[in-house]
Structures are given as C-alpha cells and as structure tokens.
Image (spheres, helix red, strand yellow):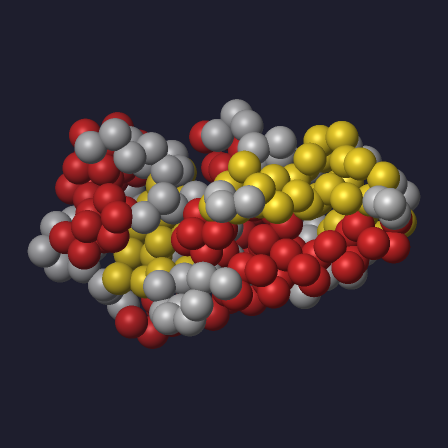
C-alpha cells in the first residue's frame, strides 16, 4: 500500500520512511504543507501521516484543503502538541486520528491499519479471495491451510490485487500503489512480480487465479480455474 508522510523534521521523516518501508509500505515524503496538498492531489494514497507544525501551511490547513478537494484518504495527524483543543481542531478539520510525539512505532502501525479498515469499509482485516488468504497486519499469505512465503514486494502486489479481487487493474495502478516516487524504472517490472506470485500462489496448487487481461492489466479471480 502507498503512504504519504508530510513531516518537516527530516530526521523524523526519514525514520518514518525507513520503518514503514520495512513493513512493506511504499512511502513518499514531503517536508512542507503546500507540497503535501499537491502530492496528495496527484496520487491515490491509501493513508497520509501528517505533521501539525509545517512550513507554508500547517497540518490543519493541509487536512482542510484535502477534504475540500474531495480527497478522503485516512489522515493520521502526528504532532508534539498534545492539548485537547489541538486534538479536537485536528479531528474537526477532517483528520481521522491523532498521535502525539514521542510515540511507539508499533502503535503507529496499528493505528494506520485500523484507520484503513475504519475509513474504507472495503478493507477488512484479512483479505480472502476464494481460498487465498492475505493478512496485511501479520504479513501472512495462505492458500487454503498452506502458508505461502512471499517477499515484501510480492506481498504488496498481491495485497493490492486482493483488495481489488475480481476487478481488472492496470500495471500503472499497481505501480502507483506499490512503488514510491523514487522508482524510475519500467512499468513492466510489475510483470516480474506477477510471474513470481503465480509461481508461488498458483502453480504449486494447480490454480490460475492471477489472470492477464490483454491490453489492460491483471485480475485476481475470486473463483480461479484449475490449471491445465
């Protein structure tokens, strides 16, 4: 899943980027309010971590502008200000949750997962597509009762396909959700990971669940065919 971090403290921003990337998130980082608004308008983020005290436009202003623009990605406001009125104002302008610094990274991750489930009803805690089970929190994948070992990037691609189970998605959509804006390679890298997934979640089980939709992209079938 793809996340935007808007944080002016560059050391904190880099720590967040590394930690979240290590959990399988594709993370983009900007350091001021106007850039946060611009980046969120350009990309379909699954969640936004937003600092309150930002140059150019504070977190309240950023969140307010996003909501006015119809951008409803869950927003986790992150700040050193812990007054009840500060928290209330953040929630009133459209933030979904509020975490004060210093914070536990484990708690931050849990809150992000909870926000995605709460803010997007189509995001259950465990994704099931046929007998394929994908657990984003535990980073586990199973076909039936058999665990399937995946790399972090393979898991991220599969998670996106599972969230769109039964729907056709383009390579560009997958790329935008799984890779961050530092990636400057070919969109066909998606093919490499789809092929790897097929070798792990389909071939050993005699299935054909990840289908190529010619000229468009891929679809994870809810009722996969048996492989010939």
Q: Is residue 139 left or right of residue 26?
A: right
- Report the front residue among 71 and 205: 205
Q: Is residue 192 left or right of residue 176?
A: right
Task: Inspect this view and state whether residue 46 appears.
Answer: yes
Q: Position of residue 112 (x, y in %)?
A: 49, 45
Quadrant in the picture for residue 94: top left
Quadrant in the picture for residue 218: top right
- Report the front residue among 53 and 82: 53
- The residue shown at (36%, 44%) is 44
Q: Position of residue 88 (x, y in %)?
A: 28, 32
Q: Position of residue 91 (x, y in %)?
A: 30, 32
Q: Is residue 68 left or right of residue 82?
A: left
The C terminus appears in which quarter of the rendering? Answer: top right
- The residue shown at (71%, 31%) is 222
Q: Position of residue 68 (x, y in %)?
A: 19, 30
- Report the front residue among 86 and 169: 169
Given the current orientation, which residue lies at the most extreme bottom position? 11
Task: Inspect this view and state whether residue 114 appears.
Answer: no
- The residue shown at (17%, 37%) is 65
Q: How many marks?
A: 0
Given the current orientation, which residue lies at the most extreme left position? 56
- The residue shown at (55%, 45%) is 214
């Amino acid at each position: 899943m793809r996340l935007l971090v808007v944080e002016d403290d560059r050391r904190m921003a880099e720590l967040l980027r590394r930690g979240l990337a290590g959990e399988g998130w594709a993370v983009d980082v900007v350091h001021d309010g106007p850039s946060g608004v611009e980046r969120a308008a350009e990309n379909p983020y699954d969640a936004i971590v937003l600092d309150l005290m930002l140059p150019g436009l504070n977190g309240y202003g950023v969140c307010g502008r996003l909501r006015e623009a119809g951008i409803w990605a869950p927003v986790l406001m992150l700040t050193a200000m812990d007054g009840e009125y500060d928290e209330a104002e953040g929630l009133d302008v459209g933030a979904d949750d509020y975490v004060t610094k210093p914070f536990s990274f484990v708690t931050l991750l849990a809150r992000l997962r909870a926000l995605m489930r709460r803010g997007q009803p189509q995001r259950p805690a465990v994704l099931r597509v046929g007998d394929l089970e994908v657990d984003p929190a535990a980073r586990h994948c199973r076909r039936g009762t058999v665990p399937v070992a995946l790399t972090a990037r393979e898991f991220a691609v599969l998670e996106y396909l599972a969230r769109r189970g039964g729907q056709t998605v383009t390579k560009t959509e997958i790329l935008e959700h799984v890779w961050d804006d530092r990636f400057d390679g070919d969109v066909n890298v998606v093919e490499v990971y789809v092929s790897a997934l097929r070798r792990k979640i389909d071939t050993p089980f005699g299935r054909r669940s990840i289908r190529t939709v010619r000229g468009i992209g891929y679809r994870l079938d809810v009722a996969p065919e048996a492989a010939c």
